[in-house]
Amino acid sequence: MRIIAGEWKRRQLKAPPGDGTRPTADRTRETLFSMLASRIGSFEELSVADLFAGSGALGLEALSRGAAHCLFVEQDAAAVRAIRDNIAALRAQQRCDVKAGSVLSLGPAKAPTDLVLLDPPYHTGAGAVALDRLARLGWIGPATWVALETAADEEVRLKSLTVDSERKVGKAKLTLARLTG
């Protein structure tokens, strides 16, 4: 697993041991960031949330491409250690916050995040539940882009968001969405 583009291009990332997490494949991450770049343009100075973060690869990719700050949220202890190790290896501590715990434990946001990246366990519906809660708590605003990875055969039902596009990549489906309204 490696960073695809930007400041840390080709830098290797550490994955958590065991099978408690499923890191996003390089090809899937490359497709996701291509989809986002065609809509967002530059990642410069964006605030990012990497939820169900696993190794932190999605948020670190955004930082490598110029995002200003990333909040990583993960409840698996081994994955939290991998995220912290990856952040330290890239010397990115000043641009990162790591929250060990459930995405559902996040409180109200001080301001909407520019980009929300979610890679929840497949076939659980956890991403849709989290997104509904985050929208109500102000994490998602009118300018926020949301990227959700699910299993390719998983139906995505979002209450407060409108799907902009979906793309299947191998075993994964990438869904980009915006706040409805």
Image: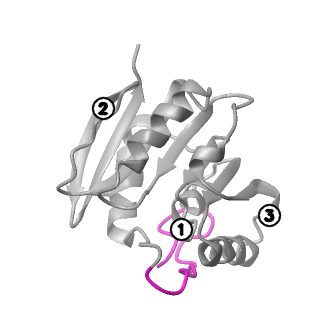
Q: Magenta residues, as a range?
A: 1-19
- Residue 95 at x, y percent in the picture: 76, 55
Q: Residue 54 carries which label?
A: 1
- Residue 118 picture location, percent across and down: 47, 51
Whichever of callouts 1 and 3 sits on the residue coming sooner in the sequence is 1
Label 1 CA crowd tier, 10 Å (few <14, some 14–19, many 20+): many
What SS does tag 1 mark?
Answer: loop
Q: Which residue lies furthest to the right in this view?
A: 94
Residue at image mark 3: 93
> Residue 164: which disc?
2
Indicate yes or no whether the magenta region holds residue 2: yes
Q: Say which label, 2 or 1, has the lower sequence index.
A: 1
Percent x, y for residue 58?
Answer: 51, 60
Location of the C terminus (image quadrant): top left
Seen as rendered, the residue at the extreme left is 153
User: From the viewer's perspective, is residue 24 above or below residue 115?
Assistant: below
As measured in the structure, the alpha-carbon distance from the residue carrying label 2 to the one carrying label 1 is 25 Å
* Residue 20 visible somewhere in the drawing: yes
In the image: residue 130, left or right of residue 47: left
Q: What kind of residue is marked 1?
A: Gly
